[in-house]
Amino acid sequence: MTALLEIRDLSVVFDGFTAIDGVDLTVDQGELRFLIGPNGAGKTTLIDVITGLTKPAAGAVRFGADDLTGRKEHEIVRLGVGRTFQTSVIFEELTVVENLDLAASFRRPLWALAGRRRGISEAVEHALTTTGLDELANEHARVLSHGQRQWLEIGMLLAQRPRLLLLDEPVAGMSLDERSRTGELLTEIAKDHTVIVVEHDMDFLRRYASQVTVLHEGRVLTEGSVEEVRANPKVQEVYLGRAREEADDAVR
Amino acid sequence: MEGFLNQLPIGLSIGAVLLLIALGLTFTFGQMGVINMAHGEFIMAGAYTAYLLQGWTGRAAVLVALPVAFVVAGALGLILERLAIRHFYGRPLDTLLLTWGVSLVLQQLARDLFGAPNVQVQAPEWLQGGPGIMPYSRMFILALAIGSVVAVWAYLNRTGQGRRMQAVMQNRRLAATSGIDTGRVDMRTFFIGSGLAGVAGVALTLIGPVGPALGTYYIVDAFLVVVAGGLGQLRGAVIAAAALGLLNSFAEFWTDASLAKVIVFVAIVGFLQFRPQGLFVLKSRALT
Amino acid sequence: MTLTTERPVAKTPPATWRTRLQGPAVFATVAVLALVVAPLLLEPFRLGLLAKYLVYAIVALGIGLAWGQGGMLVLGQGVFFGLGGYAMGMHLKLVEAQGDLPDFMVWSGVEQLPALWEPFANPVFALAMVVLAPMALATALGALVFRQRVRGAYFAILTQALAAAFVILLIGQQGLTGGTNGLTNFFELFGQDLALDETQRVLYIVVAVVLGLLYLGARQLVNSRFGRLLVAVRDGEDRVRFLGYNPATVKTVTFAISAGMAGLAGALFVPVVGIISPALLGVVPSLELVVAVAVGGRFALAGAVLGAVVMGYAKTTFSEQFAGGWLYLQGALFILVMTLAPRGIAGLLRRRRKETR
């Protein structure tokens, strides 16, 4: 296995507050990696740095052969890194299929966008079937439910054909049904993609995670399989904090 | 060299007037997300207040007018805020156009009430003349601006009302859920901001004549001060206003009046290449 | 910084053959009215006025594209209108002077033709500049400010400041621009006598055809992938970055197109109305057109065109009768539209159509 993403000694400082403090992280080609940690651990900040939304104070982010630090957001997407957000970021005025088509077309030069969309491209078709949104293809995205919005967003990611997918709390606010549907989707995607998932939901983690990285106060606490992480007393200590028993239940 | 030095008091006093105007704009924009194009007409209202008071108080009009114009312009602002603007919070582009309509109406109203030709307000005798290049009238304007900034600073940092205003500016929702009556705070902000524009109007009577379109000459530059200074930033507004006033008057001196505005515009666009959000920024993590 | 929350809420009706034919049918009807009925029925003076409104409608179309579709509130379209107008005016002046100095230069004591003027003797150059000069300025400004993510109200203020500076520049450079009076006294265009009713009629047709073509072009653009992208940029510029597009490019291109339209309109304005001067293109005229677009309906291109014609007509009619009253009326109308019908006439019509269906 080769490393697709290599983060070395990364630090992020917000107005004197160190949000990320010397993090190292390596994600291999084809891996499905979960990032967990209590609030303020720096999970989302880490993703923000990878995708160019936040500039690091120090450290390197290598993606394949490229250095990502200092690049603009859209350039990073063009290198093959796609992400979702905690709040849904689909375009409500466009239909589902238009949202997907826009995501799929970004490699075309701007002048080539001057034509009307004719039919549905293969990438869009694939994204539609994978996310199960075929039925809603021609509806405006604003009519979608919360779960459907998240799936559309994941579908837009797929349509971009990225080499690395970053999902930020994909099941937050979802119903049980929606969660398991998202889990299946995740398993499906992970077959032929490298994926990093930030997630709070312990049940979801237990069912779908294999490799887990635990962040705490801007540092990597430990890494390993779900079992290893669960057994780690340090994780129980700091991650699960004061409500230990309750949290034990959650991890179990 | 003397001509060059002459520009200094002119630039500083123009900067002082711009600052008085921009203070209101930057706080209403920063706190409520509204752009008030009728702000220029509050300047005009302040200037006409001085003109009207001249009939009773003679040459002391300018001094008497300062508090009166503050209240008159502030009241106009309050009425505008209550009647129209508060329905448009967070929609700066819509308020910009809406208040432009208001500004048209107010200008025409002034034309009908006071006539289209310019009128003159006599400055008090003790403001005439002055040592060398610095006339007393320009010193007075400068002192007025400095006094206003100190007062605004003290209000923001030393009073409960001011701190609540800062809280609303930084995070409206959080402020509201912490028990701050944001509606009241908005009203106060609007009153004070519009009142300062009225004070600026009185100051302008010391520099030149008063006409219905008085506000339109200053409003665009005052907005540029907001852009360059950063939203809701007292420090930023002070520095940007001084810089803009000086740049304007020196550009006029070095080239000619018609090129000065172009130079200022190019300078602002150039400045935004380094500080796209102005000199000082309120940080937030929200993704639009 | 969240600046725009304005967004349309109408739902597109399902495309049956009836709704599909509706658009072209309306367009064809309007085209026949404009190209055949109006020239036959209207006396030359009124036809000239209509030509003027249609010229403004071209600017409005550009505003509709930039503001309605792209969310860029452009408050300085007068600048681009002026650049096109002056390019055309300079050419006409030089043709008329037949190698001598244009009349106003003689009056201002200019002795030699300024170097800036010389190439405008060439009609091809002049016509090219009509579109290229505004587009170049818009591209330069757009590239600089959009790249730095200066947007929303900030961008609007900058365009307004540009308009203010441009007017002061024009007035100050008397010998170069004719100062406050601008350029006027045009007698012929490409060998045709501009005073003849016949010439004016042809000019009217040209304006109407140009407007029609630009409308179709703009529609095509709005319905293209680029148009979808533009709406996406309007509703969530930062999100578009994560789709791999650079919103700055999309906005700059659109801004430049709208500037080119304004420039073309300015050039048509000169022979139709017979003058181009600073008073026609400052802060207030620029804003008036934005108001017209808002009244017509900013989210529909047809609304923008309609708004320009309606407001142009209203201005002529009312300011003829009571000069000051028009300002009250315009202000009041505008306040009403912004509060009660933010989607303008087009929005009201669409709602009506939906209700009656």
Image: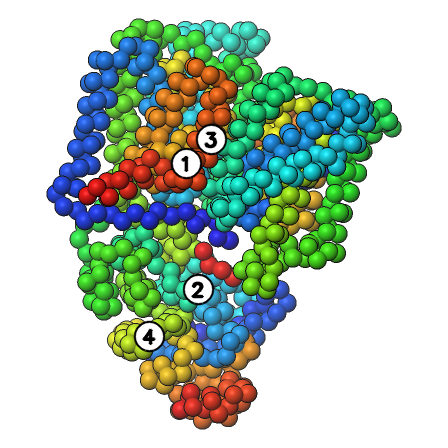
Asked whether disc 4 touches disc 3, contact meaning CB atoms under 8 Å apart, the reply is no
Within 10 Å of disc 3 (Cα), the crowding (few <14, some 14-19, many 20+) is some
Front residue of B181 and A51: B181
Question: Are labels 1 and 2 assigned to the same chain?
Answer: no
Q: What subunit carries mark 4? A: A
Q: Which residue is mark 4?
A: A175
Residue A28's place in the image compared with B164, above or below, is below
Q: Which residue is mark 1?
A: C337
Q: What distance separates the C-alpha of mark 4 from that of mark 2?
A: 28 Å
Q: Which residue is mark 2?
A: A51
Q: How is the image coloured?
A: rainbow
Q: What subunit carries mark 2? A: A
Q: Amino acid at mark 2?
A: Thr
Secondary structure at badge 4 equals loop
Q: What distance separates the C-alpha of mark 4 from that of mark 3?
A: 50 Å
Q: Residue at x 41, y 36 (%)?
A: C337
Tell us which disc is closer to us: 4 or 2: 4
* Residue B279 at x, y percent in the picture: 63, 49
Tell us which disc is closer to us: 2 or 3: 3
* Residue C214 at x, y percent in the picture: 29, 31
Q: Residue at x 69, y 38 (%)?
A: B71
Report if residue C248 is visible in the image.
Answer: yes
Q: Quadrant of residue B204?
A: top right
Asked whether disc 1 touches disc 3, contact meaning CB atoms under 8 Å apart, the reply is no
Q: Residue furthest left?
A: C17
Q: Which residue is mark 3?
A: C332
Within 10 Å of disc 4 (Cα), the crowding (few <14, some 14-19, many 20+) is few
Front residue of C225 and B116: B116
Question: Are labels 1 and 3 assigned to the same chain?
Answer: yes
Front residue of A221 and C294: C294
